[in-house]
Amino acid sequence: MSIRLEIEGKFDGKAFKRPLFYSFEGGLRFELAEGGTHLNQFLTAHRKAMEVCGHIFGDCEDITVCVKVYGEKSLVSSVSVLRSLREVGLFPKSNKEHWSEFDDEWVDDEDFANSRWHYIAFEVPLECLVNALWCALATDLGGIEPSPSANIYLFNLEKSVMIFPYDDRGMDVVGKNKLLLQGLYNQFGNYLLDYDREAMDAVFKKLP
């Protein structure tokens, strides 16, 4: 089975909807960055994300990554972003899947007539998790490099859980593996975003 089909099947076709936490019921939303300089915020966010993801991937040898890149109909239009991803090990030369989609929000907007979201999915060694989280969390923090202009999604397909670190402020974790999510809720409760804590408590406080 292709990576794309496995993602669509295990996450009910909602894996790339935004915001992910509100699109896929029963997930977790973590608050990452805290106070201080941009550098301090980034390093804190990266440390927290590594802790949570370390629990999700455990002793996995590989992780599944999907990068979402904005461009025109041809992937060539995003070559500068792809080059940046390749430099940090997030765009392998082979064994990757590519597909593109037209966003419903662009319908009847002539400025976006030729626009597409490009998705590139592949597997990388677990050691690349550090790089993937770095690039994802540096997106909106000026001065932190490398910072490719791409959304980065991480998957443990065997455990049916996905992670979307949307910027330095937060990270959504969703999936059908309620036992694993319960463990994250219990272990990293102090990292959960207070704004959505009531919704998470309603799901996970009821579980044994």
Image (cartoon, helix red, strand yellow):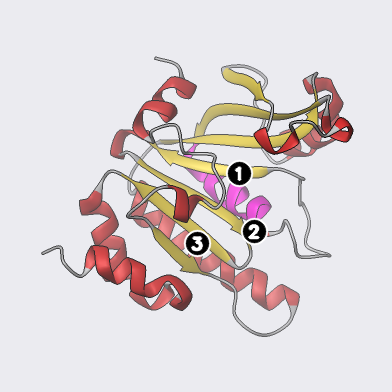
Where does label 3 land, which residue? 49
Q: Earlier in the sequence, mark 1 or mark 2?
A: 2
Three-letter residue code for mark 3: Ala
Label 3 near label 1: C-beta < 8 Å? Answer: no
Horizontally, residue 96 falls left or right of residue 160, namely right
Label 3 near label 2: C-beta < 8 Å? Answer: yes
Verify whether residue 171 appears in magenta.
no
Horizontally, residue 82 falls left or right of residue 29, namely right
Name the disc covering residue 137, or none: 2
Residue at x 60% of width, y 47% of height: 132
Where does label 1 land, which residue? 152
User: Is residue 82 visible in this depiction of the protein?
Assistant: no
Which residue appears farthest toward the bottom when viewing the image?
Answer: 36
Three-letter residue code for mark 1: Ile
Q: Magenta residues, as a range? A: 125-136
For the C terminus, the quadrant is: bottom left
Horizontally, residue 27 falls left or right of residue 121, namely left
Horizontally, residue 158 falls left or right of residue 179, namely right
Task: Indicate the position of residue 58 as horizontal and vertical percent values.
Answer: 33, 49
Cα separation between marks 1 and 3: 13 Å
Q: Nearer the viewer, residue 4 or 22?
A: 22
Cα separation between marks 2 and 3: 9 Å
For the N terminus, the quadrant is: top left
Q: Earlier in the sequence, mark 1 or mark 3?
A: 3
Residue 129 against residue 95 in the figure, above or below: below
Dot in front, 1 or 3: 1
Q: Nearer the viewer, residue 167 or 133?
A: 167
Task: Indicate the position of residue 191 as horizontal and vertical percent values.
Answer: 43, 74
Cα separation between marks 1 and 2: 9 Å
Neighbourhood count class around disc 2 (C-alpha, 10 Å): few under 14, some 14–19, many 20 upward: many
Q: Secondary structure at mark 3?
A: helix
